[in-house]
Image (spheres, rainbow, N blue to C red):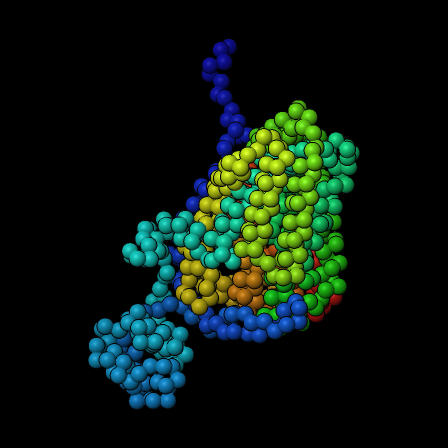
Amino acid sequence: MSGTNVKKKKDLTQIKTPHTYVIIFGVVVLAWLLTYLVPAGKFDTTEIEYKDANGEVATKTVLDQDSFRYQYNLDGNIVIEKLEELANDEATLDKIGVSQSDVEGIIADGAENISQETLDEYNLTDDTLYELYGKDIYDTSKKLHKTAKLWGTDDFGGFGFLNFVFEGLVSGDKYGSAVGIAALILVVGGAFGIIMRTGAIDAGIYAFISKTKGLEKLALPLLFFAFSFGGATFGMAEEVIPFSMVMVPFVIALGYNSIVAVTVTYVASQVGNATSWMSPFSVAVAQGIAGVPVLSGATFRIIMWVVVTALSAAYMMIYAEKIRKNPLTSETYESDQYFRDQIKKTSDEKKPFLLGHKLILIEMLIVLVWIIWGVTQKGYYIPEIASQFFVMGLIAGITAVIFKLDGMGINDIAKSFQNGAADLAGTAIVVGMAKGILLVLGGSDAAQYSALNTTLHSIGSALSGLPALVGAWFMYIFQSLFNLVVTSNSGQAALTMPIMAPLADLLNIPRQIAVLAYQLGAGFMDAFTPVSASLIGVLGVAHIDWAKWAKFQIKMQAFLFVLGCIFIAIAIMIGLQ
């Protein structure tokens, strides 16, 4: 029989996974549609004092969990009535800083011209009016939605969701996401572009592998513990991006793949962050907000860190050995070819490990120690780290010119910096796009009306009344899901702990366990969410599409989730305080 009538089966393995940009745009559209379904809400905020990890008094802006309210239109007639009373109350006028003539002018304009925008001009903000009169001034018959337009800018019609890329990129400042992270990625990319051009890393990797055959199975777990320790002690996250530039080619040269490289660096750091006993950016902030003694429960958390890190390293090694024995099973086999070609070129050329190469690697080690010292002892952050890596790249380039490595000249330093930054430009764009998701949802400011605040309030209310263990597990699930949109550890603590801490009291759960649920959920999920600027930066270095990463990581997330549930159950049983 002729084979012309036989239908060819579709080869599902040839289906292309969506590009990271496509995935994020899909999430943005879903977030935009969600704002049509979820009304906008907000909280009042307050400044609280707590002792940080160093025992010093620090302040944090947190929400008041009892102050949640939906957004409504003003009831013009009621507002006029209240303003007429206010016009004759000199004490209150002085307290809120509003003049009697301004109030009388608003009254004269009439109820039909009352709007919050007009009232804001006279310092009669929504918060001020709510503090004075509560919900009486609103027409509560209809909850309002804060939904962005299809297109628009701040100057022309207001934020439109199709402008999420630009708005996401320019949000924040040099100390954080997105513009700070994007700038860090570009500078670090340029610095490592110079270092890679010198050939020092390639020559060093080749020399190391030639002399340490058979030690691969020992190297990876030790590195996993090292990066986990960094996450546990000083909240290592953005700092992993430059480390990954060295680790990805190194791990691939050992016979593994880029997924293993990202796991041994970034995932390890987030495992440490999730089980930390002292991170100043997560557990210390959460404990301070929850009213729990800072760094309390350290013994339990140190044991948890050792166990979870060891089991996670074992999980990684099982996968890593599977890839080493059969490289074709790797999800990133094609994209890793770039690194294999570089390694093979170095190996084929039998590039000598010269004095210039050694000096550059020593200089890199010195700068990395400088960075760790600066972060842990001096509080260095994104601006300082970016500057330190620029220094590292510049000195490496000058050393290469002096020792004539690979025929480098002065112009080659500039070109290499440009090429290195260009290689990570796409990753910097993703950071801004990911931040745009949060903007479409209305932002993460508890004091501004948004669908995100309403979601936070609704889930917090739904958890009340559950049995202790079930309630603690649901807290853990909620914190994990919340991290999909808010990846800042301190930001998530400020938004969620003012609700989760008193909720723990209602469920008869120690507040320490509410903190534990927060740190486990926030830490583990940071290794998965496409909104994490740090993760996207590391994946960009490794040339891994997020969809391929998710295919591997979702299984590991299930493994980590089970470990988290077990430790929360143990904490409940022992009454962790």
The quarter in which the C terminus is drawn is: bottom right
Measured as percent of width and height from the top left, residue 245 is found at 60, 41
Q: Nearer the viewer, residue 98 or 368?
A: 368
Taking the view exactly as shown, the residue that stands out farthest to the front is 402
Whether residue 48 is visible, yes or no, is yes
Measured as percent of width and height from the top left, residue 270 is found at 63, 52
Quarter of the rendering containing residue 299: bottom right
User: Where 426 falls versus 371 (above or below)?
Assistant: above
Residue drawn at x 37%, y 77% as measured from the top left: 129
Quarter of the rendering containing residue 523: bottom right
Residue drawn at x 46%, y 70% as measured from the top left: 43
Q: Nearer the viewer, residue 545 or 360?
A: 360
Residue drawn at x 27%, y 75% as measured from the top left: 76
Whether residue 555 is visible, yes or no, is no
Q: Nearer the viewer, residue 380 or 564?
A: 380
User: Where 92 falls versus 407 (above or below)?
Assistant: below
User: Where 326 falls versus 533 (above or below)?
Assistant: above
Q: Nearer the viewer, residue 423 or 454?
A: 423
Q: How many numbered discs?
A: 0
Asked whether, in this view, residue 87 is left or right of residue 517, the answer is left
Measured as percent of width and height from the top left, residue 92 is found at 37, 86
Residue drawn at x 50%, y 33% as measured from the top left: 16
Measured as percent of width and height from the top left, residue 174 is found at 49, 56
Asked whether, in this view, residue 332 is left or right of residue 317, the answer is left
